[in-house]
């Protein structure tokens, strides 16, 4: 079983300025819960107890969120407001948290490499909190739990996929591969943010991964790619050429909370379908 999960969370969140000038974008709330907590709950549900964060200089609020606040808890102890801490208390009681920093913004591949000491020589999950992924039904199986089963069956790295419209394809990493059935693909090629005429398919990579530990050495030997950044897609392509990457069209609903439109859409969805329920 995959027991560890890494959260790259060092980005500046410039699309949400000025809200993210002094606040981590991962701490922006979807109704009454920060984005990062949804991701941690998803990891825990998949059996990933060891949670690592790659943060930056302005991201102290993430560590504070998953720690005890003695003043707050004392203030509301025994009142009707205490119930609002139940979900984060569950996360704190069931997860084991560790933190490191990415000193420079040099791409997702570099961020994951910064987390090597937290993940060690074991397969591990990666969740990008900007992508909010919710089960098909409330209480249903989450995306990381679905992917973990595929890794256990195959021993391969697993990447989450979804079909996207042609006009948005340039925002994503895109794959080509052999359709294995049941939503699975043996990935043969990947292109980072291609023009629509250059995209090998409409299957885009979403911010959920399970990676085998050899990815660290591959990243170390991967030169900077698009935007002069170390791209995880380029490192995964090395594994894919060896037949060791499975793409999976997951069951669930995904919101791009890195965009204002997606963030508002997610907020409305959670309010109507989860919070009010």
Image (cartoon, rainbow, N blue to C red):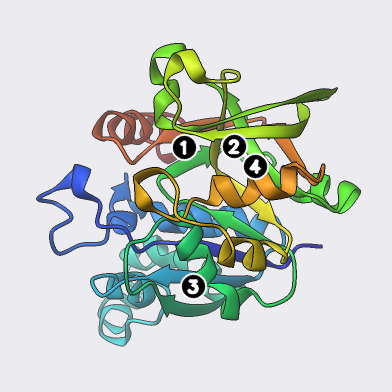
Mark 2 or mark 4: which comes first in sequence?
2
**Pointer 2 or 3: first along the chain:** 3
**Cβ atoms at labels 1 and 4 below 8 Å apart:** no
Eyeballing the image, is 251 above or below 150?
above
Q: Are marks 2 and 1 in contact (CB under 8 Å)?
A: yes
Q: Which mark is residue 138?
A: 2
Spatial CA span between label 4 and label 3: 24 Å
Q: Which residue is mark 3?
A: 114
Residue 137 visible in the picture: no
Q: Which label sits in the foreground, 2 or 3?
A: 3
Q: Earlier in the sequence, mark 4 or mark 3?
A: 3
Q: Is residue 117 above or below residue 5?
A: below
Residue 195 seen anywhere in this rendered image of the structure: yes
Q: Percent position (x, y) of residue 96?
A: 58, 78
- Can you tell which of label 2 and label 4 is closer to the viewer? 4
Say which element carries label 1.
helix
Q: CA distance from mark 1 to mark 4?
A: 17 Å
Disc 3, SS: helix
**What secondary structure is marked by label 2?**
loop
Image point (38%, 76%), residue name: 63
Q: Which residue is mark 1?
A: 274
Are dots 4 and 3 in contact, CB under 8 Å? no
Q: Residues within 10 Å of mark 3 (few under 14, many from 20)?
A: many
CB-based contact (under 8 Å), mark 2 and mark 3: no
Marks 2 and 1, the one that precedes in the sequence: 2
* Disc 1 from disc 3: Cα separation: 35 Å
**Closer-to-camera residue (50/157):** 157
Q: Which of label 1 and label 4 is nearer to you? A: 4
- Mark 4 falls on what kind of element? helix
């Amino acid at each position: 079983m995959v027991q560890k999960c890494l959260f790259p969370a060092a980005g500046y969140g410039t699309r949400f300025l000025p809200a993210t000038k002094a606040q981590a974008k991962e701490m922006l709330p979807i109704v009454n819960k920060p984005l990062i907590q949804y991701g941690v709950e998803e990891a825990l549900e998949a059996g990933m107890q060891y949670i690592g964060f790659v943060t930056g200089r302005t991201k102290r609020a993430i560590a504070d969120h998953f720690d005890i606040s003695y003043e707050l808890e004392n203030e509301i102890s025994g009142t009707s407001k205490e119930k609002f801490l139940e979900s984060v208390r569950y996360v704190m009681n069931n997860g084991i948290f560790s933190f490191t920093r990415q000193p420079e913004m040099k791409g997702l591949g570099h961020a994951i490499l910064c987390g090597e000491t937290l993940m060690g020589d074991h397969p591990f999950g990666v969740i990008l909190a900007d992508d909010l992924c919710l089960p098909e039904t409330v209480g249903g199986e989450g995306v990381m739990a679905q992917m973990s089963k595929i890794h256990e069956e195959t021993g391969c790295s697993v990447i989450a996929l979804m079909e996207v419209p042609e006009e948005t394809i340039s925002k994503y990493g895109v794959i080509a591969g052999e359709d294995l059935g049941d939503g699975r693909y043996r990935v043969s090629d990947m292109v980072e943010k291609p023009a629509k005429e250059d995209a090998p398919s409409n299957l885009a990579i979403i911010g959920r991964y399970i990676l085998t530990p050899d990815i660290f050495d591959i990243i170390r030997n991967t030169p900077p790619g698009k935007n002069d950044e170390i791209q995880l897609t380029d490192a995964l392509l090395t594994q894919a050429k060896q037949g060791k990457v499975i793409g999976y069209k997951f069951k669930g609903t995904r919101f791009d909370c890195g965009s204002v439109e997606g963030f508002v859409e997610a907020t409305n969805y959670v309010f109507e379908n989860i919070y009010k329920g």
